[in-house]
Every structure is written in structure tokens, then in C-alpha cells.
Image: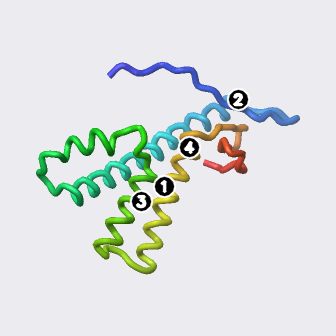
Amino acid sequence: MKQIKAIITGVAHVSTSGINLTEAVNLAHEARRNRLKVIEGALTIENQLETIIQHYFFGTSHEKRAVFKSIVLDSDWCFFAAKRKLITYIIDEQNLLEGRAKNDFDKLMRDVMSIRNAFAHGKFSSDDSEFGFRTLKGNPETKS
């Protein structure tokens, strides 16, 4: 497969004692690999949620299943949050989880999107010993 070429930016923090730019760049590469893993992991979870939603509404072989996925689940307005609400409805309606297990599941789903959004929309910065990112909302740096 042909590799995509793109301009990549970042911020290197230079102190009065200097910086090892090679180390800062190496940390940036490692953080970008982690970013990819986080985003891919979140997409995997989202795909599993879609599978559950489709199965709940259409079973395994309903003729409208593919249309529903194409028009609704794959649409630009059906975000992860909407799919999470559908899953919550399914869990409640089917009594699949309750109590602590349900709360833990809800927290995990919120965390998946929160961490995914931080990695997808945050701004990377580095010196030669640490790498972090700042979200667009201005949240404090998080180490990666």
C-alpha cells in the first residue's frame, strides 16, 4: 500500500539549558503511534456498538439491515454519543446491566470518547524528556 505523505506539526519546548531535538522528535513519533492506537481502538468499539444496534433492531438477516447502517449508523449526524444513547436504551429495555455494572459500562463509554477526542483533537507538545498534549478546550497537558 502506498504511504500517505502529510505535513506534521508539533511544538518543542526549549529550556535555557537546551533540548535534544532528536529525542523530542522520537517522543513525538511514539506519541503519534499511541494516538493511532487510541483512535483505532475507539473505532473498534464504535463498530461493535453498531453491530449490537443493528442486531437489536433487525436481527441477523433483515432486508433493511444494510440500509439502516448506511443511512443512519454511518451518517455524519449519528455520532458516538447517539450510538451510546441507543445502546443505553437497549441495555435498559432488555435489563442487560444494572447497578454498578451499568454505571461502570457508562463510565467506560464516556472515557472512550473523552480519550479519543483528546488524542484526535488535542495539540501535541514535547521537550526531550516528556511528551503531552493539550485539548482544544485548553485542558491541562496530559502525558502520553
Q: Is residue 129 left or right of residue 17?
A: left
Tag 2 secondary structure: helix
Label 3: which residue?
Answer: 85
**Eye-nearest disc, 2 or 3:** 3
Label 4: which residue?
Answer: 119
Circle 2 crowding by C-alpha within 10 Å: few under 14, some 14–19, many from 20: some
Q: CA distance from mark 2 to mark 3?
A: 45 Å
* Residue 37 at x, y percent in the picture: 45, 44
The picture quadrant where one finds residue 21 is top right
The picture quadrant where one finds residue 136 is top right
Tag 1 secondary structure: helix
| Mark linked to residue 64 | none
Between 33 and 107, the residue placed more toward the observer is 107
* Residue at 61% from the left image edge and 35% from the top image edge: 28
Q: Is residue 48 left or right of residue 128?
A: left
Amino acid at the residue labelled 3:
Lys
| Mark linked to residue 112 | 1
Tag 4 secondary structure: helix
Q: CA distance from mark 1 to mark 3?
A: 14 Å
The quarter of the picture where the N terminus appears is: top left
- Of the numbered discs 4 and 1, the one sitting upstream in the chain is 1
